[in-house]
Image (cartoon, grey):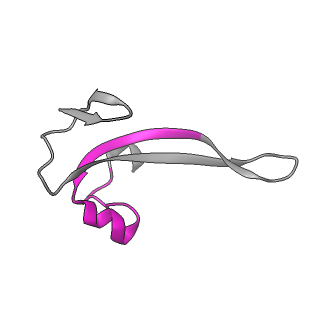
Amino acid sequence: MRLAEARIGLLDVPVSRAPRENECVFLRTVEYVTTEPEHGNAYVAEERLVELFLAPPEQSKAAGSPQPDRLPEATR
């Protein structure tokens, strides 16, 4: 499927089907947070892109991010 965004342009993404009118494509990530040794300040050291999935946008407003029925294999 191909998505379009004004700042980015066209982007091909591997999702099973095009989103319906009431759906958005969400990108799930995992952030690895660590602390620097001298002062203990926390920061995101790495970010892993885990999954693209389709969901209604209302879920993201209510819960912070949509929750699919299951976690992808990589996060179990």
| Residue 47 at x, y percent in the picture | 52, 40
| Residue 30 at x, y percent in the picture | 48, 47
| Front in this rendered view, residue 74 or 18 | 18
Q: Residue furthest bottom?
A: 62
| Above or below: residue 54 compared with residue 2 | below
Q: How many marks?
A: 0
Quarter of the picture containing the N terminus is: top left
**Residue plotted at (42% across, 39% down):** 49
Quadrant for residue 8, please give it: top left
| Residue 4 at x, y percent in the picture | 26, 34
Name the side, left or right, on which 67 lies relative to 15.
right
**Residue plotted at (58% across, 46% down):** 32
- Bounds of the magenta span? 46-71
| Above or below: residue 67 compared with residue 19 | below
| Above or below: residue 9 compared with residue 71 | above
| Front in this rendered view, residue 71 or 55 | 55
**Residue plotted at (34% across, 63% down):** 60
Q: Does the magenta segment cover residue 59?
A: yes
| Front in this rendered view, residue 33 or 76 | 33
Q: Does the magenta segment cover residue 49?
A: yes
Name the side, left or right, on which 38 lies relative to 44.
right
Q: Residue furthest front?
A: 6
